[in-house]
Amino acid sequence: EWCTRELYCPACDSDQLSQSKPNSQAVDFMCAKCEQLFQLKSLRSWNPRKIVDAGYEAMLRAIRADRTPNLLVLQYSSTWLIQNLLLIPRVFFSESVIEKRNPLSSQARRVGWVGCNILLSQIPDDGKIAVVSAGVPVLKRVVREEFSRVKRPAEIPRRLGDGLSMSSMPSGGSGNLDFLCKNSTNQRKT
């Protein structure tokens, strides 16, 4: 109930997210205005290193097909008060942040099913946008600015054949893509 009342779209000026249709795979909310998709993981205990997600193979397929939603990681207190809410833009999901879990045992209802964890520790700080921090909401304007800042490089086609020509690149097409990582905490030192 809190989510449908309080969540807003960080990608546009919509102040509301709609709940997705029942049984929508990996999608809990969407923006009716810009069609951004969101998955919500809510937990009482906060693990800054990783969170449990769904099926491993399904997650890999979503990443490879570029269909992962933005992730909302919500932490609540024992009295159901919102403590923290992180937004992880979909552009930060790659196979390297997905950890395969062991198959379920023979005693489990879904014997052999393999789940996965999302390794939050492998996502750079730029990819963890605070929406609520220590119980205090972050200004919408600030959240939207951060989301816009990290989203822009992701709009550049992944392969040169997808429309990015060498002449449209900075440095006259020298192949230097450091401009994509300018604000990244994981920028390589050369």
Image (tube, rainbow, N blue to C red):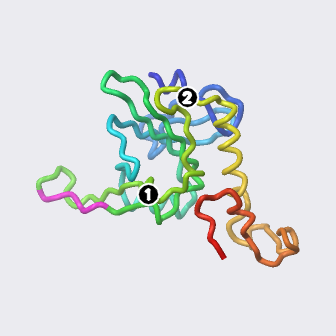
Q: Provide the secondary structure element on which disc 1 rests.
A: helix
Amino acid, disc 2? Leu
Q: Position of residue 100 (x, y in %)?
A: 34, 63
Q: Is residue 11 above or below residue 180?
A: above
Amino acid, disc 1? Met
Q: Position of residue 115 (x, y in %)?
A: 32, 56
Question: Residue at coordinates 71% horizontally, 63% vertically from top-left?
Answer: 180
Query: In the rendered view, does 53 fall on the left or right side of 169?
Result: left
Main SS category, magenta section: loop
**Tag 2: Cα neighbours inside 10 Å, few (<14), some, or many (≥20)?**
some
Which of the marked residues, 1 or 2, is nearer the chain's N terminus?
Answer: 2
The answer for how far apart the CA atoms under marks 1 and 2 are is 24 Å
Residue 172 magenta: no
Query: In the rendered view, does 154 fall on the left or right side of 120?
Result: right
The C terminus, quarter of image: bottom right
Q: Is residue 111 above or below residue 34?
A: below
Residue picked out by circle 2: 7
Residue picked out by circle 1: 59
The span shown in magenta is: 101-106
In this view, the mark in front (1 or 2): 2
Q: Toward the viewer: 50 or 67?
A: 50
Query: In the rendered view, does 165 fall on the left or right side of 102?
Result: right
In which quadrant of the rendered view does residue 101 lie? bottom left
Residue 103 magenta: yes
In which quadrant of the rendered view does residue 118 lie? bottom left
Q: Position of residue 164 (x, y in %)?
A: 79, 68
Question: Residue at coordinates 39% horizontally, 53% vertically from top-left?
Answer: 49
Q: Position of residue 37 (x, y in %)?
A: 57, 42
Question: Residue at coordinates 73% horizontally, 70% vertically from top-left?
Answer: 177
